[in-house]
Amino acid sequence: IGALERQVPAGSTDPPEQERVLTSRTHNMRMVFDSAKYKELRLRAFYAVPKMVVIPSASALLRRKRQHSEVPPANARVAWVKELLGRGGAEAGPGLRLACEHVRRWSLEPAFDTCALVRRLVEGKQFAAALRFAREFQLRREFPTTTLLHAMLAQKRYDGALKACGARCRSVDGEAGPGDVLRMMVRAGEHCVALKYVHKFGQAAAFPPAQLVRASLQGDLSVRTAAMLLKYVPLFELSDAFPREAILERAAASGILVHELAGGKLVLKGRRRSDSASLPPGAAVPVKVGSAPN
């Protein structure tokens, strides 16, 4: 490939010498799609060959599908959002969140009172969704972030409150700092989740990770606890005190099935609570629950 050959000085008769590594030069690359509905893209690449095949990620494909999918007429979109807002019972909460999602995606803000939508989220104690849509609807003045985070802490939603804060923040809700919330979390017995935020906020000196791991290993392990331990024990360099094999044995003894994928990644599968009563001791019904949380 000519682009990977060293440049030969002018007047030299020596043949170009092939490089064994890619150079730092980049090249313009024009992508043309077979379907006319996709726009032409211009990229820069370290190397390019004729008719190069570019395979986009799954998230990029989904985003592209949403962008080019057929959008229903405006009246149908408004009717659909109203139907979501009218749902009751167990579907009220998910319906409200989905309605806010469609109002944002379809730019239906003029047809709905976005302030009232966020207020309904707050009244339903859906604080994480309220934080998101207060930001996306530009309603932070009406719904201050610190006020919503304070309400989350009042409801003992420590995980969600710390998740919404940056790693360098000094205060969560204007009063309590990350260390204070971590202390509340530990007192509430959420030791495995505390590991995540001790790592995020650099609070290992105040909350020794070894003590949190030891407390998390008390009793049967849940899928989330096992996933947290498998992820954060190596990050805190505690593998000598808490070997991976020992954690996997405890997970198996707790009825969790562990499958190892290519590359060393693990998928944990738990038991259905509804079926556990009718099963003999130690039997496990696999249910896909995903991999270790972030």
Image (tube, rainbow, N blue to C red):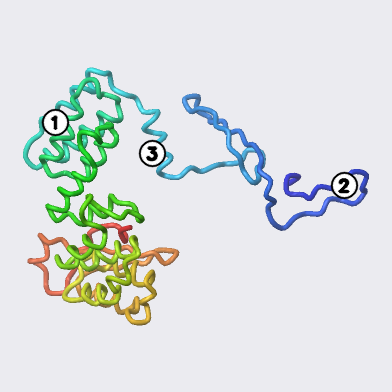
Q: Residues within 10 Å of mark 3 (few under 14, many from 20)?
A: few
In the picture, the disc for residue 279 is: none
Give the image location of residue 13, x and y in percent.
Answer: 93, 48
User: Mark 2: which secondary structure?
Assistant: loop
Assign the C terminus to one quadrant of the image. Answer: bottom left
Q: Which residue is mark 1?
A: 85
- As shown in the figure, which amino acid type bears the numbered disc 3? Leu
Disc on the earlier residue, 1 or 3: 3
Q: Within 10 Å of the Cα at label 1, are there few (<14), some (14-19), or many (20+) other Cα atoms? A: many
Q: Tell me: residue 41, above or below residue 226.
A: above
Q: Along the line of sight, which residue is nearer the eye, 195 or 20?
A: 195
Write down the quadrant of residue 255 in the picture: bottom left
Q: Residue at x 26, y 74 (%)?
A: 213
Q: Residue at x 54, y 42 (%)?
A: 54
Residue 197 percent location from the top left of the image = 29, 61
Residue 221 against residue 123 in the figure, above or below: below
Residue count near mark 2 (Cα–Cα under 10 Å), binned few <14, some 14–19, many ≥20: few
Q: What residue sits right under mark 2 in the picture?
A: 9
Label 1 to label 3: alpha-carbon separation:
26 Å
Q: Which mark is residue 62?
A: 3
Which of pointers 1 and 3 indicates the residue nearer the eye? Answer: 1
- Residue 220's spot in the image, x, y percent? 17, 73
The amino acid marked with disc number 1 is: Leu
CA distance for labels 2 and 3 = 48 Å
